[in-house]
């Protein structure tokens, strides 16, 4: 009889401990931490290559160099980046929604640069100008993604560097 009481008390304590431990967990914080530390590093590495390719061009870059950089560096890096980002599958809706915004921003930038290449190859200033608007929208969306990432981190106690 005493053994049953002791066993029941141990089971009850274990159950209470499990319940309290479960109440303290934050699935979004765990998912966001996993997203940043485990899922996004490969994407971040590709993004650095992409950013390096982008930084190699400026307003004084001649048309042929720009076409070459778009074809050989910027668009391929952008496409690899998007492909790798699509492999990331967060668990929680909050992080999924955030990650989808990242993919949308990168896709928009890619579309803008593809249109820019088309405009440069056809010497069509109108197409080049409209491509710049698309690329700017992608940049704005990316900035919004970064801000939302930081906000989500603050909300769930996850440090974002």
Image (cartoon, rainbow, N blue to C red):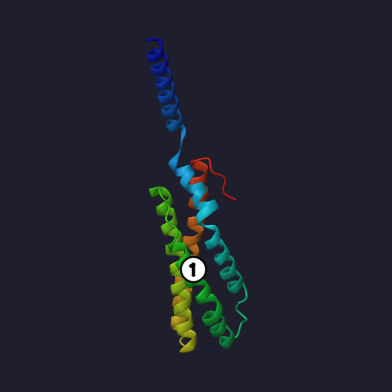
**Circle 1: is it few (<14), some (14-19), or many (20+) Cα within 10 Å?**
some
Where is residue 5? Give x, y as percent: 39, 13
Reading the image, the residue beneath label 1 is 136
Which residue is at a point 53% across and 40% down the rendered structure image? Answer: 157
Residue nearest the observer in this picture, 79 or 115: 79
Residue 81 to residue 159: above or below: below
Residue nearest the observer in this picture, 108 or 25: 25
Which residue is at a point 56% across and 84% down the rendered structure image? Answer: 68
Which residue is at a point 48% across and 76% down the rendered structure image? Answer: 113
Where is residue 25? Give x, y as percent: 46, 36
Residue nearest the observer in this picture, 160 or 91: 91
Residue nearest the observer in this picture, 100 or 124: 100
If the image is split into quadrants, where does the N terminus sit?
A: top left
Residue 66 to residue 135: above or below: below
Give the secondary structure at mark 1: helix
Where is residue 12? Give x, y as percent: 40, 20
**Residue that lies at the very extreme toward the top in this rendered image:** 2
Which residue is at a point 48% across and 46% down the rendered structure image? Answer: 152
Where is residue 133? Give x, y as percent: 46, 72
Query: Number of callouts in the render?
Result: 1
Residue 12 to residue 86: above or below: above
């Amino acid at each position: 009889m005493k053994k049953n009481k002791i066993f029941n008390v141990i089971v009850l304590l274990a159950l209470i401990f499990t319940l309290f431990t479960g109440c303290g967990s934050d699935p979004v914080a765990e998912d966001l931490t996993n997203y940043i530390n485990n899922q996004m590093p490969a994407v971040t590495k590709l993004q650095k290559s992409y950013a390096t390719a982008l930084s190699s061009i400026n307003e004084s870059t001649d048309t042929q160099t720009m076409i070459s950089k778009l074809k050989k560096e910027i668009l391929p890096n952008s496409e690899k980046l998007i492909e790798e980002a699509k492999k990331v599958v967060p668990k929680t809706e909050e992080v999924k929604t955030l990650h989808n915004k990242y993919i949308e921003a990168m896709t928009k930038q890619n579309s803008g640069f593809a249109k820019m290449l088309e405009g440069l190859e056809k010497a069509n200033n109108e197409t080049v100008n409209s491509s710049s608007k698309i690329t700017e929208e992608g940049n704005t969306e990316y900035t919004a993604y970064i801000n939302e990432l930081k906000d989500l981190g603050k909300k769930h106690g996850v440090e974002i560097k």
